[in-house]
Amino acid sequence: MKLRFLNLRGSDIDFNPVFFSYLIITYDDLLLFVDSQKLPGDFSQHQSENNVNITILPYIDIGQELCQIVSNKNGKIWISPSSSYYLTALVPKSKRLQRITPIAESKAIKNNVEIEGFINSHIRDGVALCQYFAWLENAIQTGEKVDELSGADKLESLRCTKEFYMGLSFNTISSSGPNGSVIHYRPTKETNRLINDKEIYLCDSGAQYLDGTTDVTRTFHFGNPTDFQKEAYTRVLKGQLTMGSTIFPAKVKGQVLDTIARKALWDIGLDYGHGTGHGVGHFLNVHEGPMGVGIRVMPDDPGLQENMFISNEPGFYQDGEFGIRIEDIVQIVPAQSKYNFANRGALTFKTITMCPKQTKMIVRDLLTALEIDLLNGYHQLVWNTLSPILAQEGDSFTLSWLKKETQPI
Ligand SMILES: [Mn+2]
């Protein structure tokens, strides 16, 4: 079952290509409540060309229309648990079916067009990221002054040259030293710090492309990291590699996997205060349910299923000193397993984010042979995927940085 009723986008909310509206679906009609001035001139034509019959009503009429449906129709009304109190209260309890709608679950499982777009947009995004980090490393090492804000601007200026770019998917978390330990930090004029070779630089960023949404974090040290920083980084990476290669039964709740990503940190009494994974919309919200991987209970999680896309982002934060996070977007794909969970089906993850992870920060002895293979395999894939594009663009500067950063350890 694939339910994508309208597949519309808008621009009412920064970073999220959505718009204020309500939709009521009846057996006979689709009622879209939206300020009709927001609709493009060819909207009705586009809908009829795609065989969509839709009635447009004023946004403010939702309550009135819902009341009429309640009094005129028998049977239950399926209302999303995230609907407002006002709308929920208009439906008498006896008529309410209040649980997560099939649309939310279906939207989380990407179709073939969305999968292809996700993969392609992550490749273009990866090129921009490599161009930025190559530029940044060189700038810091040659004494050029780059701060959190000008760094974020540089990254945006590289992303916006890429095909199908529509804007950022959230405010870039460009953070130097202690600012990196603030998990939801974003640089302002007051907090802005220079990026330097004495402190860790954490950059969590993402973009909206017409064919996909990206969200990626990389952590770098452009000088000499301390032993503790290297140990913490390595253990964050261990968690990410282990989670990213875990085989699990189909439809297991995301929460079950959370501990896997934390184990290497827990082993030495370290932890992080955020979730390990969230769903990502397809040219939609960068955080999108109903599934997720975290300590927090997610009651609406329908279980992890093939072709869902989530983030894999463990981290570690030393208050007032530094932050470390490594974040990829992963696609849920079938896995080879000996017994296939008695036909329940085995799944695993495929990383679609394309950007090297700084090997200089790694304590090799802390990694298992399997983890080393996984990391080297990932870097080989990144090199194979991005190097032809950089070569075609004639960007030999970024190409040589990529070569250095994807060397096997
Ligand atoms: Mn994320």
Image: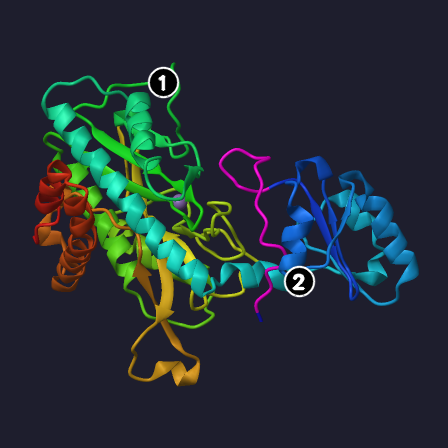
Displayed quadrant of residue 114: bottom left
Disc 2 to disc 1: CB gap under 8 Å: no
Report if residue 270 is visible in the image: no
Residue at 63%, 52% in the rendered image: 46
Mainly helix, strand or loop, the magenta region? loop
Percent x, y of residue 14: 52, 33
Residue extent of the magenta highlight: 2-18
Ligand 1 falls in quadrant: top left
Above or below residue 243? Residue 390 is: above
Q: Which mark is on residue 243?
A: none
Displayed quadrant of residue 369: bottom left
Q: Is residue 240 magenta?
A: no
Q: Is residue 9 magenta?
A: yes
Label 2 and label 1: CA atoms lie apart by: 52 Å
Q: Is residue 155 left or right of residue 145?
A: right
Q: Secondary structure at mark 2?
A: loop
* Amino acid type for the residue under numbered disc 2: Asn
Percent x, y of residue 190: 38, 14
Residue at 51%, 50% in the rendered image: 288
Above or below residue 302? Residue 334 is: below
Percent x, y of residue 101: 65, 61
Report if residue 4 is visible in the image: yes
Q: Which mark is on residue 191?
A: 1
Displayed quadrant of residue 37: top right
Q: Which mark is on residue 51?
A: 2
Front-lying residue, 264 or 237: 237
Ligand 1 has an atom within 8 Å of the beta carbon of the residue at disc 1: no
The answer to which of marks 2 and 1 sits earlier in the sequence is 2
* Amino acid type for the residue under numbered disc 1: Thr
Q: Secondary structure at mark 1?
A: loop
Residue neighbourhood size for the residue with mark 1, other residues' Cα within 10 Å, grouped as few (<14), some (14–19), many (≥20)? few
